[in-house]
Amino acid sequence: RHYPRPVCPHCFSMESAYKEMPTGGAIHSWTVCHHPFNFFFKATVPYIVALVDMDAGVRVNAQIRGVAEGDLAIGKRVRLAFEPVTKEVTLPCFVAE
């Protein structure tokens, strides 16, 4: 289930396991953020957040890195990557496939 949470929204089971999934997907939608979600993102505005249909069958939203706004299109292929922020925090992001 995505997003990770303790209870299944369909059967209410507490049983779950993490599985590796393919990292490819296609852009479903995106937005350009000019006002930061919180203070942590203030230095990076404007930034692009995309909703991506993953090949594994879930939708994931995260920032896109290294893709210009003019190069974005619905259906464009991207790959999920992970960006270390601090020793304790790593965030997902999308990069061009």
Image (cartoon, helix red, strand yellow):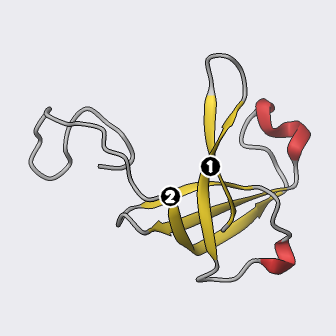
Residue type, mark 2 in image: Thr
Badge 1 vs badge 2, beta-carbon distance below 8 Å: yes
Q: How far apart are marks 1 and 2 (CA)?
A: 8 Å
Report x, y in % for residue 51: 56, 65
Local SS, label 1: strand
**The image quarter in which residue 84 lies:** top right
Q: Which residue lies furthest to the top in this view?
A: 87
Kindly identify which residue carries mark 2: 23
Kindly identify which residue carries mark 1: 81
Query: Residue at the spot x=25%, y=32% of the render?
Result: 6
Q: Which residue is nearer to you in this view: 19 or 64? A: 19
**The image quarter in which residue 75 lies:** bottom right
Report x, y in % for residue 53: 47, 70
| Label 1 crowd bin: few (<14), some (14–19), many (20+), radius 10 Å | some
Quadrant into which the C terminus falls: bottom right
Q: In this view, does 31 lie above or below 91?
A: below
Task: Using residue 78 as the reference point, say whether residue 64 is left or right of it.
Answer: right
**The image quarter in which residue 86 lies:** top right
Report x, y in % for residue 20: 37, 46
Residue type, mark 1 in image: Ala
| Label 2 crowd bin: few (<14), some (14–19), many (20+), radius 10 Å | some
Query: Residue at the spot x=61%, y=17% of the render?
Result: 88
